[in-house]
Amino acid sequence: MRTVYVNGDYLPETEAKVSIFDRAFLMADGVYEVTSVLGGKLIDFEGHLARLERSLNELDIKKPAVFDDLLDIHRELVRANQIEDGLVYLQVTRGSDGDRDFAFPDRETTEPTLVLFTQSKPGLATSPQAETGLKIISIDDQRWGRRDIKTVQLLYPSMGKMMAKAAGCDDAWMVEEGHVTEGTSNNAYIVKDGKIITRQLSNDILHGITRAAVLRFAREAQMTVEERLFTVDEAKDADEAFVTSASAFVMPVVEIDGQGVGTGTPGPVAKRLREIYLEESQNAAI
């Protein structure tokens, strides 16, 4: 049985409780982060912590009192649950003032809710999909306009995953005004004539922690990076495509809407970036 963390207490998962009036439950009024664990160590933790603080500030959610202790809490959960490879999920909500109201509760009298739990994922870095690549579909992006905030409003991305599953594919890329925004739970990229192309940062996409690290490593390896909009047709005509996320790292995409990308197999740029990212991130893990 897993040990989880709820508002200051380490508990068996069967004893964990949150109020039915919690605003995440009633209003999706909360944010989250997922940090990967490889070899018992946390990957890109500082980046996830910085993005969590940004998300809280953007939504005017008070930081939990234990914010400065989050590294220790992550490590204790990894230790208690004997996680070698896996994930630590963290969620902060605006909390509960004991009733339901559209207006935010008083920050001075309502404490945020803080929940963390682990997921064991043996062999996380050696996923077979990295060798075969993902098949994806394109769908209309029908999410809200502040996708740069990592909120728990994940209904449409979940619907996108199910649309892909129904089509016999692995995932979906969302499209707005003819251009790819991102995947349901990842940032999207194409490679053309040696250039790595990905949408520039804005309110339209999540500011991926893995994205930032991968682009930094790519530039350090003298690869050309171009941050701009690209269309689905451009993606289908690309030499390669791939996605990045905290749990998939760098994952090749080999098919879009039934059409093979490049050779229809994982390409050299995605493979190399995955190798670099895993090596560098594990060296820097804490």
Image (spheres, rainbow, N blue to C red):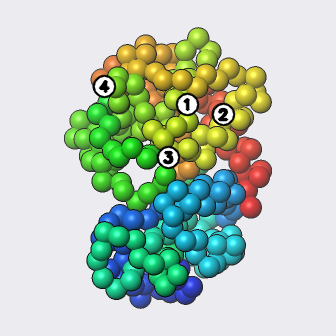
Cβ atoms under marks 4 and 2 closer than 8 Å: no
Asked whether residue 2 is in view, the answer is no
Q: Position of residue 105 (x, y in %)?
A: 41, 76
Residue 98, image x, y percentages: 34, 85
- Kindly check if marks 1 and 3 are in contact, taking CB atoms under 8 A apart as contact: no
Q: Residue at x 45, y 78 (%)?
A: 106
- Closer to the eye: label 3 or 4: 3
Residue holding disc 1 = 200
Find numbered disc 2 in the image and state the secondary structure of the residue it sits on: helix
Answer with mark 4 or mark 1, whichever residue precedes in sequence: 1
The Cα–Cα distance between marks 3 and 4, rounded to whole angstroms, is 26 Å
In the rendered view of the protein, which quadrant contains the C terminus?
Answer: bottom right
Q: Quadrant of residue 183?
A: top left
Residue 161, located in which quarter of the rendered image? top left
| Rendered location of residue 40, percent (x, y) | 67, 64
Which residue, given by chain and number where applicable, does mark 3 sit on?
148
Kindly identify which residue carries mark 2: 215
Circle nearer the N terminus (3, 4): 3
Q: Secondary structure at mark 1?
A: loop
Q: Amino acid at mark 4?
A: Asp
How many numbered markers are drawn? 4
Question: CA–CA distance between discs 2 and 3?
Answer: 18 Å
Secondary structure beneath dot 4 equals loop
In the rendered view, does 18 fall on the left or right side of 77? Answer: left
Residue on which the image places disc 4: 257
The amino acid pointed to by label 3 is Asp
